[in-house]
Image (cartoon, grey):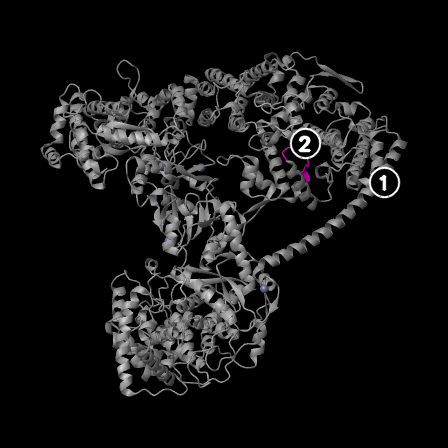
Amino acid sequence: MADAADTDPDPASLCADFLSFSARDTASSWLVAPDLAIPLHAHLSRFVPHLLRAGQGAGLREQQREELGVQLLLLAPLEWLLLGEEPSAAFAALKEANRVSALCGHVFRVGEPTYSCRECAADPTCVLCMSCFLKSEHKEHRYRMTTSGGGGFCDCGDSEAWKQGAACSEHKQDQDQDQDQDPVQSLDPDLVFRAFGVFRAILRYAVDMLTWDREDSVPAGLEPPEKSDSFYCMLFNDEVHTYEQVIYTLQKAVNCDQKEAVSFATAVDREGRTSVRFGDFQFCEQAKSVIVRNTGRQSKPLKVLVMHSSVVAHQVFALKSLTWLSQVISHSDGLRRVLCTVALESRSGSGETLVDQLMLNDSKMWKGARSIYHQLLMNSLLMDPQYKKVFAVHFAKNYERLQSDYVKDDHDREFSITDLSVQIFTVPSLARMLMVDQDLMAVIIRTFLNLLRHRDLQGRFQFDRYTAQQAFKFGRVQSLIGDLKYVLMTRPTVWSDELRLKFMDGFSCFLELLRCMQGMDAVVRQVGQHIEMEPEWEAAFTLQMKLTPITSMIQDWIRTDEQVVMETYRCCLIALTHSLSGLADGEQPISLSLAGHMVETFRYQVSQEKVSIHLPLCRLLAGLHVLLSRTEVASRFPEQLPLGELSPPLLIELPLRCLVLCAQVHAGMWRRNGFSLINQIYYYHNVKCRVEMFDKDLIMLQVGASMMNPNHFLMIVLSRFELFHIFSTDSRKRFRDSNKDVLQQNNTLIEEMLHLIIMITGERFTPGVGQVEPEDELRREVMHQLCVRPMAHSELVKALNDNGNKETGLERVIDSVASFRKPGVSGRGLYELKPEWSKHFNLYFHHYSRADQSKAEEAQRKIRTQASGPGTSGGSGGSGTNGSTGWTESMLQRVLHLIAMALIEEKQQLESNGEEELTFNYSLKIQRPGSCGSLLSLLETLHHSPHLELHKDMIGWILTMVSHIRTLRLRSEEESVCVTAAVTTDHTLREREAAERRRKAEMARLRREKVMAQISAMQKHFIRENRELFCESRESAPCGEEQKCSSEDSVGAPVCVGPARAGLVSASPVTCILCQEEQEVRSHNRVMVLAAFVQRSTVLSQNRQSSSGLSQSRDVLFMNPALSLGIHTASCGHTMHATCWQRYFEAVHQKEQRRQQRLRGNTSFNVEKGEFLCPLCECLSNSVIPLLPPASTPATSVEQNLDTWVSATTLQLQLLRHKWSSGQGAEHAVTLGAEPAVTQGTETAETRGAETAETRGAETPVPEGFNQDFVPEPLPSPLSQMMSLFSLAVYKVALKTNPNETDPRLCPVSWSTCAFTIQATERLLWDDDKPLFGSLPCRQEECLSALCRFTSHCWTVAPPTTAQQHFSRLFSVFSASHDAPCLLDLDMFHLLVYCALSHCTVQALDQTGRSSSDSAHLNLLHLVTVAHLVQVLLTLTEKEDGTMEQDGAGAEEHLLLELYTVLQSHMGSALPAVASGWHLWRRVKAALLPFLRCCAMFFHYMNSTTPPAALLLSDGDQWAALCSYLSIPSNILLLYSHHHHHLDSLIHSWCSDPRVLQRLSESRSGPGSVLVQFPRESNSLVDLPEDYSDLINRASTFTCPRLSMDQARAPTLCLVCGTLLCSQSYCCQTVVDGDDLGACTYHALTCGEGAGLFFRVRECQVLFVAGKTRGCFYPPPYLDDYGETDQGLKRGNPLRLCSGRYLKIQRLWRQHALAEVIAHAQEANQTLAAIDWQHL
Ligand SMILES: [Zn+2]
Ligand SMILES: [Zn+2]
Ligand SMILES: [Zn+2]
Ligand SMILES: [Zn+2]
Ligand SMILES: [Zn+2]
Ligand SMILES: [Zn+2]
Ligand SMILES: [Zn+2]
């Protein structure tokens, strides 16, 4: 927009305007004008184009200038005119006089939390804002929380929205205040008069401008005085083109760079339009044509208009004036009502109001304009109870037009005026009023039908012929169903005649809609060939799914009024009869006869003709029929119902066909019809649809069966199942004729038919079908779900399709049948069926899928009790056909089940009724002899059949039952014949005995099973509890700490460092996981390696600000105590031969390279970075550590005390330095890092120069046996190769550069990973309160010891001089030079490790053959400990910990105070005074402890020394044990006092370093710089609030840090540092090395060196990222009352922090396990790799 500068109005002229302008005078001149519009328009036409020309792309300063101009020149006179006095004071006075609003009306921001009460909300759309919620009574209720999608407002104070507690304490009003009092009357009448004038003029102006449709000129009266011809090229938003397309096009069209294009695209998306070019017409037109050409190739082009600048300026001001109006009316209810009146008064003549004008132009406006006027509507009309009604009427009147506009538009519904329906239709009184006055229900349905005009010849919807555009339209039209749902949400309590009339009108429209669906998407069975194309089925089911709740709601309404029940039943029956009339046309019925019965039926076969799953009319009638039987109205007013027209065979025909279709599909007869049909059948039974599909079909069959002759019913069923011929002909013939496939098919059909009959007769748990309450139905459902397996609350809710928003009583039912099992730190809470309920289990429960059925059967068999009956009857259910006889186990099982059901029915009747009323006599029928004897005798034969072991129990039960019923019948016949009785009792007795025997055997079996189950559970539990243990015992040989311990006990306390250290017991051999060969680790054996993962880490960082930017140039030889960046090495502990591993890695590498050509980078590891997965455990690794043999016990070690050793070493170093400076010095000078090396280099050169001069003068004596030119023998080559491989891997990760074997930093980075890994492990053990030794898992033990042994030989991979020079620099800390960083800038543990490891190179030059290395280590340890002691004392702060002083440790206190005094003498006031030596000693001990623990670990793993017993325990005083293990006096001050003549000068030189004083004063003067104090505190993840909604509320106010006004769409919290980020959004992407990185990925780079863990606040989800391209989601630490997480916030139950889970996440982070978790997650779930982690 650089061009804008040229034509910018002269600032001077504007200034002049400002100066000469008086708002007050202007206002008074307008006041006297007869028509305000005339002078106002003149004023606006003069100033608006002048002021508002910067456009959207303008800079901040221009925007501010614009704002100021608008306020002073345009709005101020209006305010003066309106108020007649100084505006700000007048507004304040108005606000003061206004009474507190009864409605909250807070409009929600995107992402703001909203609350609804399940107990009290009238419907789920009634919500509260957080502030109202916290002040309301619902806080204590069962509430629900969601995040707002923006728009909508708080319903606090709306008595219709809440059954109780309508207002929070703030919005509660006194009862006596008159709600209906007109607020305008309390205003000054003059003010009211002026308000009418101003509001009318401004609102008309604004509405006219926003609905203005010419882009080249302004409306009459607004023409600018001097016409300057400048134009904007205005780009409009659409939902067709992607961000990328827009950005790409703009770069081409207006020659802008990527960044500008992104900002244009963002603005278009946000505002709905933005100007991308400003200039003359031609200039803009040119850009327009490029954009249109570029975007119009595949789709509709982007909308671009070249608009005259004055049009745009007036439109911008129009929006500003609407916002201004919103503000003005917020001060006074009276003014608000005035505005409402103006907005809804009809404009001269037309009858159309301003609001109508806006609404009708809604879809033509751009997004930004729509949002602003919608907001104004919400603030005005919807807040005024009186005008809300008037507005509702206008809205309903325009409904059809608005909806068709919306359907044609492409913007999301939230930007459409139609979205306001939720604000209006959900208010019950408004909805009722609109329904009665405006016939709303019918209007909505008619509009819907009108918008879906595409039908087939019979007038049905025809989705399969839809074009893309029709499909799009269909997608949008569905929102009307949502509106219908709102209208029907609340049932009427009283029905007026008017309401009945309008409801019936709506109902007949609804029937019309169902008629369009009845029979749609019919299918015909394919034979021979597969279908060519899968037919479209989803649209029909989408519609079905959306209409399911509507249909249920309509039935709910109907239920409440008997008259309506009858009316609707009649209408529905007529509609159905009408649609069924064509069913039998043309075909003669066929007549069936069987066993003396005859019936006529349709000539129709499901397998041959058309059949449809969509039968909504039949199903609605079934639903109404149930209502009818519930009310019993039919029996009272039979004359009002056309029951005579009912033809049961006709009613059951279509539902039966549909059920037969399902059976045939299952029998495999429809295989050639493809997946489309399978999906339809699936949804037919699915919980989302079944209420109005499968369930109702079953009811219809029950209805039909109840009205028909049962024999006729069965014959029709047989015939529809196409089984009639089988049962009517000789069964033997059937088996002879049929081939195997047909036999199998028929068997399945018979099974299905039997199942259907079981369901028709048995499923009577729907109120109206059986005598039950709704709760019984629900309970049975819950129970059967839990019979399958224990379930989480959300699973149950899903399985039952419960409405989680509202109180439905589900929880009560669940609690009555199930017990809750709480979750641990993973998994979720589960409900288990209480055992007493499992006796109600029915294997043939109608909602079981086949999978459910077999799972439930399996589960119930396991917990089956001895109680038998049809409910718990077992049996394998196997469908194996028994040879050629053609029956299956399932068939038999079902038949037996049916018989049992019949017997139970009879028994119940017998027990409850007298003999007279007994209608059911199955026990007699079962004994009636047939062609093969009676059924009973057949059963008795079967009972002894050896093939039927599985059914024996069931048959036995039936036989017992028959005799039991016989007894019952006989008992009621008092004059019973003795003989019969005797026979019966005898029989019964025998049966009983047999039953008892079986029962006992069964019980014994169950007991055995239970014991076995218990043992197995105990085992599993034990393994779970001790997983670590088991892993160890499985993965590698036991570490054998105890063995070592016992062997060492006799020797005395072990020492790990110094000449007195003990060596190792024999090393155990290791096994290669690849070739399974076992061998010992020796330097001349084949090299063994350990898989390892090296990564950068900031986990221990004490200063997150300073970690970045150091990688390339930092001096790696000294570690700052802030530990901002460390290199961590981890391992899974798996060993391999180096050669085996190399072969493996090469194979993986090749495979990946082949793979990547097809599937780019979809792996959990990146071979380019040397990554691979451990071949055994799939753990992510990126290198291998070579294994080295353990150090041997020192045999010929010399002891040197500190003083002698220091002087000897100084001497040796002097000689070496002399050699370097005289010889090849220049080339060999150690250069560590680019920047510091230069200065360092010169510095060292200087000091070196001075020293060499000295040494020359003093003529240094060469120590005995010291050979400065000695070159040590190299390690065997395969080993040294692996060593440099690992060094280079560490180097690569640490410095992020290409490997360079000659870089002198190679050794230091390897040392550093050793030191850092030990430090990290020490912290982990400390934080977990675990003992220092013996508690680590084996894999970590292996890793640490391999790492320490490797680093102790690591110097051999570099030239000896380099390492010697390192030592020389490190040792300068202990000489008087200030060559090294100052004492406060050193991490002492790193220093110790580096010194100890680099000293070996100097030691190697000693040719005396006596190793002084151990003694050197000890002396170094002592020196560094003293240095650390001084460091700790210098950094102590004044704070005292308040513990009472105790006696003890007298000597330490005394010496410590002495040392402190020495330090004070050096530092002066920089050190605080200390009160007591006791406190000081306590704090010093605590500060030194981590260091000593690290030292103990280091020497332990390097020297393989057994740790003392005290360090294998976590409790007790470690101090003494540590000191003794480290060969340090337990009074650590003795180190100082024994050598104080040497150390005093050293301390003096440390303290006199000016940098020390500088650091101290910096930190004490301000919080800016970080002075690390000891002990360093372990880093924790940020605290999360207990209540999740606190978090979400905090994030809802978060705006994007780059676009300050924009709300972030995906606010994401960094759990490490607490920064909130604007994730997953273009605005916050950053380019790093040519890649666009989302805010999270970028932040992870800086905050966690690539590893990041975040909390996605709106999704309630934890995000792990590693590097740029990898990540995974992790369950959040928030749980609801049911022990479940809610990722994506789908359920909205209140969530609370589960600290156990949060600690688990924190542990993963501290363990550096994020990368590993991600790799495992991606390995397990390949779709994760496809997620665009980089842009999150
Ligand atoms: Zn509120
Ligand atoms: Zn409130
Ligand atoms: Zn409540
Ligand atoms: Zn091997
Ligand atoms: Zn492994
Ligand atoms: Zn962070
Ligand atoms: Zn952003």
> Could you tell whether 582 is left or right of 874 in the image?
left
Task: Answer whether residue 896 is magenta in the image.
Answer: no
- Residue occupied by mark 1: 990
Q: Is residue 321 above or below residue 1281?
A: above
Q: Which residue is mark 2?
A: 668
At numbered mark 1, what does the secondary structure look like: helix, strand or loop?
Answer: helix
Q: Quadrant of residue 486?
A: top left
Q: Which residues are magenta?
A: 839-848
Tell me what residue is drawn at x 65 percent, y 32 percent: 846
Q: Residue at x 29, y 75 (%)?
A: 1550
Taking depth in this image into account, of 382 and 48 the one nearest to the observer is 48
Look at the magenta stretch and give its main secondary structure: loop
- The circle on residue 385 is none
190 in relation to 1195, above or below: above
Across and down, in percent, residue 36 comes to: 17, 22
Q: Position of residue 792 (x, y in %)?
A: 56, 44
Q: Position of residue 1442 (x, y in %)?
A: 36, 67
